[in-house]
Image (cartoon, rainbow, N blue to C red):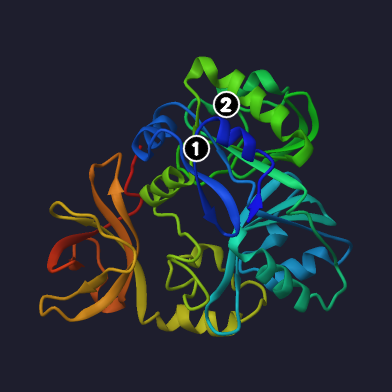
Amino acid sequence: MKEVALSSKHKELNAKMVPFAGFNMPVSYEGVNIEHETVREKLGVFDVSHMGEFLISGENALELIQKISSNDASKLVDGKAQYSCMPNNKGGIVDDLIIYRIDSEKYLLVVNASNIEKDWNWIAQHNTMDATMRDMSDEMSLLAIQGPKAAEAMQALTKIDLKNMKFYTFEVGEFAGVDKVIISATGYTGSGGFEIYFKNEDAEQIWDAVMEAGADFGIKPIGLAARDTLRLEMGFCLYGNDIDDTTSPIEARLGWITKFTKDFINSEELKAQKENGPKRKLVAFELDERGIPRQGYDIVNENGEKIGVVTSGTMSPSLEKGIGLGYIPTELVGVGNKILIQIRKKAVSATQVKLPFYKG
């Protein structure tokens, strides 16, 4: 079990630690609902240092990235980030990721913790153009400082103008007295904020500074459990739940990051699927009565026949109702259409809704 650089800090705060993607990670501190509400109303800090970071550089860096990713990275300029995915050869997804353009010959790829080795091998396998690859995952820490008060609270720690930093842009500069920190206006909560990348040896200094700067604004440490409820309220896909090696970006409603203006791995098959329409689609639903739809629960029709499966589900802390995502046949998809979620022995009525669940 790997430990993140801030592991001792989490233990001092009496975090509940659990194994996650091979790391010992804080799942909660005070409780999911309190932590969730803190991010929605004030600001919270997540340690997500288990994520993977690959540096792709050299004159052929962009060529490699264009080949392995579905979005069009040629549209990036220095200081811009892009959400994308890596399709496999079978119509599925190797992983989803964020691509940061540092300059025309240097890109940072941020991938999911559970897929670091798989992703590295996949990219290396397709690196026929000899781009330089460096796995920095074990050297870097990552904090997500999220919530409506994040910019105001963190401004004391940097000269970079946080309030006016546009979504999915980043700057490299001094933060909390540490140089060469990547400050990125990204996050997976839907409540605004930043993701801060830095070297492991600076982790405690930055953590302490963040907690001190945020104290007057109500900052709290937030665990992975609340990260999951926050991202689900926005309808953001989680790898291993809503997308995986068997789900296509077209099925998962990620057509907006799948650009057919270029060739990439399996682009022809995915283009045909987009033109012909997929056989199933990921839908969002809210329960019409009390209950919690859990991952793996069957989605059934009125005859009790299985038509799909819940990929993510929870009791929404903001909406105080059961919400979830799941795949069903395309002909049954439609906002307002009813489906049934098999919760133990009862088929509970649910309504398909438009994302996000949480409107802010």
- Residue 91 in percent (x, y) is at 53, 81
Q: Residue furthest top?
A: 216
Residue position for label 1: 15
| Residue type for callout 1 | Ala
Q: Residue at x 61, y 29 (%)?
A: 164
* Residue 63 x, y percent position in the rendering: 79, 69
Q: Report which quarter residue 173 is drawn in.
A: top right
Please state if 317 lies on the left or on the right of 300 as rendered.
right
Viewed as shown, does residue 162 lie left or right of 92? right
Disc 1 crowd, CA 10 A, few/some/many (<14, 14-19, 20+): many
Q: Classify 233 as above or below 210.
A: below
Camera-side mark, 2 or 1: 1
x and y percentages locating residue 330 in the rendered image? 31, 77
Quadrant location, the N terminus: bottom right
The residue depicted at 45 percent of the width and 37 percent of the height is: 191
Q: Residue at x 75, y 41 (%)?
A: 200
